[in-house]
């Protein structure tokens, strides 16, 4: 068992038994990558045992981002969570949040370690962290998702460590842990290239805080890569065509710029599209997640290297990586989220930021998190970290959803995560709206003409034309009519012939 013999070996149940009702528990990982696997399940069973006896048992959950099924789903389904921050993507958890049965706080992922260290979220009672090893002197060799683990290990009163033997011990060769001092004692972060390394291959913990270790050999539960749907491919074609045009115009250097891409089907499709375009040169990534599509591009040489917070790839891709680590260790850097998502670094490196939107309004505001302004989907995530400081801030979405009952382009966003002041380019399968330098009325024309589905353009144009004059034209009596129709009648334009969306 190596160095971990310095700490008590526990079963998952024994580890979970050290966590008390109402404790604040910080979990490692960034998505399912690097999330603990067996202690959360045992904690959920512990909660259910209390509930069967009619007793209350819930914990406050903190994690660098979402955690996948192993943490968020398991605990939510056991009704074991009273509070969650700062991001999640679990359907079970989302339902509890929207039923007001769980408190949820949504904020920029790059802010989380600092917020944690200053105590705005209270004391962290327990940190549960996945690692390949922990040494006697407190070096913690993390796995596939770095997230906020270094900060959680520092602030937690007690620490439980899952030693996961599925993961390669050589992951440490990719890891670069650098902890920012608290203000006002910060110097410029010495990262001038996506692959610069400035820290250590391990996080640290006070050994006296380690309650024990639990051994596992379970892979991250990321899904295998799914081929892009036709609508996602059309969005990707539009994004890649726009970027190629910017390069041809001299606004992107011939060597290209580092790329950030959000997680999901659209992001995967765009990365595939960049890989296929013959005139897009090999490029680097400075991003928060390294997805399945990135793996293929890295192997082909189209991605020259990637800085990321988490390897959000399938078990098969991880096994391939682990079997040939010599081909990958010099091309991937795994960082804490306060560096992977650092706005100052995004600006310095000139990152092209590409993220998905739930809806966009006719003036360029973007809603990434709330359906009809009230129901949480996943949260803001890292998109806001990048869009405000990117060289190019691009948001993408299909122009319609639910068979045409929902338009992604609306008169006014029902919730705003990214404002018109930093959103520069909007893309749907219909086309591209380049908003740079445009007045509000010109932005509205460009978004309606290029991004809205044709079935909704007449409505949106009429809205602008009939609104009261002003620097920004809005009719406050009608700006949310589409959302009200959706909530009351099941479609934004109830009389629309939905068969046109099948063509």
Image: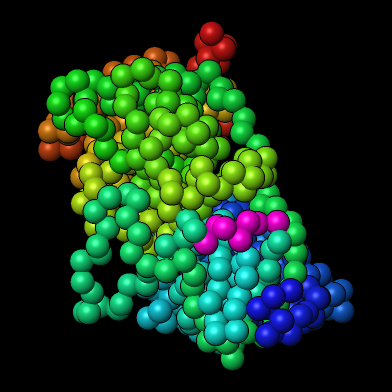
Name the image quarter holding residue 110.
bottom left
| Vertical order, 149 against 316 (above or below) | below
Residue shown at 63% from the left, 56% from the top: 168
Which residue occupies the foreground of this view, 205 or 122? 205
Q: Position of residue 418 (x, y in %)?
A: 32, 47
Q: Is residue 72 left or right of residue 312?
A: right
Residue shown at 70% from the left, 56% from the top: 166
| Vertical order, 412 against 340 (above or below) | above
Which residue occupies the foreground of this view, 316 or 427? 316
Q: Position of residue 173 (x, y in %)?
A: 49, 58
Task: Farthest residue to the front: give it.
Answer: 326
Q: Position of residue 97 (x, y in %)?
A: 59, 59
| Vertical order, 360 against 108 (above or below) | above
Q: Is residue 370 left or right of residue 158?
A: left
Q: How is the image coloured?
A: rainbow
Residue shown at 76% from the left, 80% from the top: 9
Task: Farthest residue to the top: give it.
Answer: 503
Name the image quarter holding residue 258.
top left
State the extent of the magenta-drawn residues as a range.
Answer: 166-172
- Is 273 magenta? The answer is no
Which residue occupies the foreground of this view, 458 or 117? 117
Can residue 387 be spotted in the picture?
Answer: yes
Q: Position of residue 232 (x, y in %)?
A: 49, 24
Task: Farthest residue to the right: give it.
Answer: 53
Residue shown at 38% from the left, 37% from the top: 304
Name the image quarter holding residue 439.
top left
| Number of numbered markers | 0
């Amino acid at each position: 068992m190596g160095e971990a013999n310095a700490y008590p070996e526990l079963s998952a149940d024994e580890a979970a038994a050290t966590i008390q009702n109402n404790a604040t528990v910080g979990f490692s990982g960034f998505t399912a990558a690097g999330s603990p696997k067996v202690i959360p399940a045992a904690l959920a069973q512990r909660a259910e045992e209390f509930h069967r006896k009619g007793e209350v048992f819930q914990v406050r959950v903190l994690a660098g981002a979402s955690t996948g099924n192993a943490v968020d789903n398991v605990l939510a389904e056991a009704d074991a969570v009273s509070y969650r921050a700062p991001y999640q993507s679990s359907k079970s958890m989302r339902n509890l949040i929207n039923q007001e049965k769980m408190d949820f706080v949504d904020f920029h992922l790059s802010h989380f370690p600092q917020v944690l260290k200053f105590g705005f979220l209270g004391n962290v009672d327990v940190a549960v962290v996945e690692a390949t090893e922990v040494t006697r002197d407190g070096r913690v060799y993390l796995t596939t998702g770095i997230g906020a683990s270094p900060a959680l290990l520092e602030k937690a009163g007690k620490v439980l460590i899952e030693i996961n033997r599925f993961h390669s011990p050589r992951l440490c060769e990719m890891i670069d842990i650098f902890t920012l001092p608290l203000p006002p004692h910060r110097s410029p972060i010495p990262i001038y290239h996506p692959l610069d390394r400035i820290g250590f291959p391990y996080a640290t913990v006070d050994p006296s805080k380690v309650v024990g270790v639990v051994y596992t050999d379970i892979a991250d539960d990321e899904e295998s890569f799914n081929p892009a749907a036709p609508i996602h491919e059309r969005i990707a074609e539009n994004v890649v065509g726009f970027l190629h045009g910017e390069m041809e115009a001299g606004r992107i250097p011939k060597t290209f710029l580092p790329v950030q891409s959000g997680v999901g089907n659209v992001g995967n499709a765009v990365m595939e599209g960049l890989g296929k375009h013959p005139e897009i040169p090999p490029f680097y990534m400075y991003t928060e997640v390294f997805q399945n599509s990135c793996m293929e591009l890295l192997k082909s040489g189209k991605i020259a290297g990637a800085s990321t917070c988490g390897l959000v790839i399938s078990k098969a891709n991880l096994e391939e990586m682990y079997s040939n680590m010599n081909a990958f260790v010099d091309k991937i850097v795994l960082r804490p989220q306060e560096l992977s998502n650092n706005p100052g670094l995004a600006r310095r490196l000139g990152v092209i930021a590409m993220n998905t939107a739930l809806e966009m309004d006719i003036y360029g505001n973007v809603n990434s998190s709330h359906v009809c302004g009230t129901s949480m989907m996943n949260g803001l995530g890292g998109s806001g970290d990048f869009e405000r400081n990117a060289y190019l801030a691009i948001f993408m979405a299909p122009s319609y959803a639910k068979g045409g009952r929902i338009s992604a382009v609306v008169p006014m966003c029902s919730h705003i995560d990214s404002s018109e002041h930093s959103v520069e380019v909007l893309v749907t399968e219909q086309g591209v709206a380049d908003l740079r330098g445009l007045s509000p009325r010109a932005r509205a024309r460009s978004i309606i003409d290029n991004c809205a589905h044709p079935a909704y353009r007449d409505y949106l144009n009429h809205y602008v034309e009939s609104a009261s004059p002003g620097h920004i034209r809005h009719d406050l009596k009608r700006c949310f009519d589409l959302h009200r129709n959706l909530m009351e009648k099941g479609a934004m334009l109830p009389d629309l012939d939905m068969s046109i969306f099948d063509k």
